[in-house]
Amino acid sequence: MPADTFVTRLNEQIGNEFSAHQQYVAIAVHYDAETLPQLARFFYRQALEERDHAMMMVQYLIDADAEVAIPGVAAPQGAFGDIVAPVTLALEQEKRVTAQINGLAALAREAGDYTSEQFMQWFIKEQVEEVATMSDLLRVVERSKDDPMEIENFMAREHPGGEGEDPTAPHPAGA
Ligand SMILES: [Fe+2]
Ligand SMILES: [Fe+2]
């Protein structure tokens, strides 16, 4: 059985991942309404990844015979002043999640729950990638904020989608 403190915090993290999902859907819808389909597509896809993160955590708790309590989430921000603001928010969110994930790994280790610590390793690696991707995107949108088509071309070129499955990823519940 995972440590009780870890189970409590992982259930909270399921809420944080669903919250990230909702925020990315709201950002995608915003860009879609602004007719920026490549940015929209990128954030719809990011949203699905966050949903999968939540469901990987659900599967871990089920496999460990621990209690799963799906939390509610607060409404995301849906209105933005310019093309840069959603990406700034996304980068802040990824940095916040990185701190949460590292905190979960530290908590598992302190509790002597090395199985849960190992479960968190994939998320630590994933957060490095997500922060790097969002930092790069912020640089691009800041540089080209007066030329949205330049940003759209960048997204089509650099983030075409279909990156393929990560065979090392934990299994999401229901998938
Ligand atoms: Fe996530
Ligand atoms: Fe993320």
Image (cartoon, grey):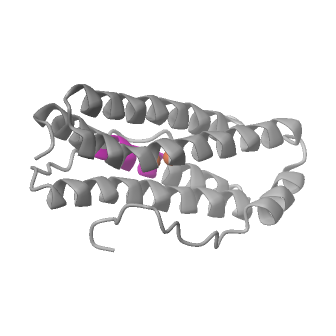
Q: Is residue 158 visible?
A: yes
Question: To which quarter of the image does residue 114 belong?
Answer: top left
Q: Residue at x 38, y 46 (%)?
A: 17
Tell me residue 25's x, y (percent).
50, 55
Q: Position of residue 121 (x, y in %)?
A: 42, 45
Could you say where residue 152 lies in the image, as x and y percent from the top left? Answer: 81, 58
Which quadrant would the C terminus be assigned to in this image? bottom left
Q: Residue at x 14, y 51 (%)?
A: 68
Q: Tell me where residue 130 appears, x and y as whole percent.
A: 59, 45
Is 116 left, or right, of 157 in this rendering?
left
Res 83 seen here: no
Answer left or right for 45 relative to 114.
right
The reply to whether the magenta stretch includes residue 145 is no
* Residue projecting furthest to the top: 110
Magenta segment's dominant SS is: helix
Q: Which residues are magenta?
A: 14-23
Please check the rendered image and state whether residue 22 is part of the magenta-colored stretch, yes or no. yes
